[in-house]
Image (spheres, rainbow, N blue to C red):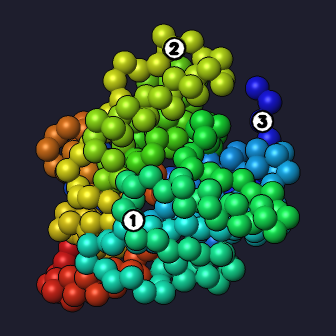
Amino acid sequence: MKVNKVNLGFYPTPLHPMTNLSRHLKGPRIYVKRDDLTGLALGGNKTRIIEYILGDVIRMGADVVVATSGIQSNWARQITAAARILGIKPVLVLRTAQFKGTSIDYTGNLLLDYLMGADVRIIEASIRDNVVREMQAVADEYRASGHTPAVITDEPVIGVMGYYDCSQEIIEQSARLGMEVDYVVHATSGGPTQAGLVLGFAAAGKEVKVIGVNSGVYDGATTISRIRSFIEKGAELINLDKEKLPSTIDVLDGYGDYGEATKEVIDAILLTARLEGIILDPVYSGKAMAGLIDMIQQGQIDAHSNVVFIHTGGVPAVFAYKDLLFKKSQSLPSSYP
């Protein structure tokens, strides 16, 4: 398969045990895959995906990229940084998508977008609204000025290769640690991350259960449908026999709407911070950790298994929740956890 990948991240990202958290939960051995350390403008999982997407943008000869997401988007931050590195003008059509418990101000990811010089257009829309018309209008502005814009309305299938690569890193690193991975848990939304992991483990003949904790961008059924589509199309990209794919797609719901920081999510963020010194965000990785903790406590994950938790990044978004997080952290007893 011929791809037009560009190299932007720093790999392999570390894989190390979360000894204190495992002991606290009296559960399985938990390892964390530090994809918050991919290195592109404070890192995150989108870097792996963007490397493949922007490779095609460059091949097309584009000098402007138009992307969209919510106002505190990790995707927008990382695509802005990537575009700057590659000499492409980043244009962001950001939807207000008001996060519950936060205010819209110039902090977190949005501040970083401005620092990197993105042309930011903020529109009144939710994360689920179709804003293709608005994006095309912005692209037309640049086209009229002699530019060649590329409009990214959704994550192309080629993006699954980013987490196909990550699965191979996990296989190699776990082998060096002398352990077999039983579960991989991560935050899921659009589909390429989970699809890439499923494809990578299946191609390697590894029976790893990949569980995505829904971030609330879409409902559970839509999320599963999107992931399945990415898996099927991705299998064609790598010429993988579909009979080797798992029959089910594991998505865990119940941790709030997109941008909503529920009590369980906040508790998971604080527990991880105080036991492991690792900062999670309320939108994605915090939800994934809340889901992992619940599955362990409910006995849905075997206590003798090995679990890899993928930290998908998103730390800048923490600052958009500063009031909520500070208040909760100050209410905890001195003996916590």
Residue 302: % across, % down: 24, 36
Disc 2 versus disc 1: nearer the observer: 1
Give the alpha-carbon distance from disc 3 to disc 1, as whole Å.
Answer: 34 Å
Image point (20%, 37%), residue name: 300
Of 278 and 18, nearer the camera is: 278
Of 110 and 12, nearer the camera is: 110
**Amino acid at dot 2:** Lys
Q: Which residue is mark 3?
A: 3
- The residue carrying pointer 3 sits among few (fewer than 14), some (14 to 19) or many (20 or more) residues within 10 Å by Cα, namely few
Helix, strand, or loop for circle 2? helix
Image point (27%, 66%), residue name: 260
Image point (81%, 57%), residue name: 148
Of 123 and 1, nearer the camera is: 123
Relative to 95, does residue 193 appear above or below in the rendering? above
Residue 192: % across, % down: 52, 41
Image point (48%, 80%), residue name: 108
For the residues bearing labels 3 and 1, Cβ distance under 8 angstroms: no
Q: Quadrant of residue 88?
A: bottom right
Give the alpha-carbon distance from disc 2 to disc 1, as whole Å.
Answer: 38 Å
Disc 3 versus disc 1: nearer the observer: 1
Residue 207: % across, % down: 43, 24
**Circle on res. 295:** none
**Amino acid at dot 1:** Ala
Q: Which residue is mark 2?
A: 242
For the residues bearing labels 2 and 3, Cβ distance under 8 angstroms: no
Q: Which residue is mark 1?
A: 125
**Amino acid at dot 3:** Val
- The residue carrying pointer 1 sits among few (fewer than 14), some (14 to 19) or many (20 or more) residues within 10 Å by Cα, namely some
Helix, strand, or loop for circle 1? loop
Q: Is residue 153 left or right of residue 39?
A: left
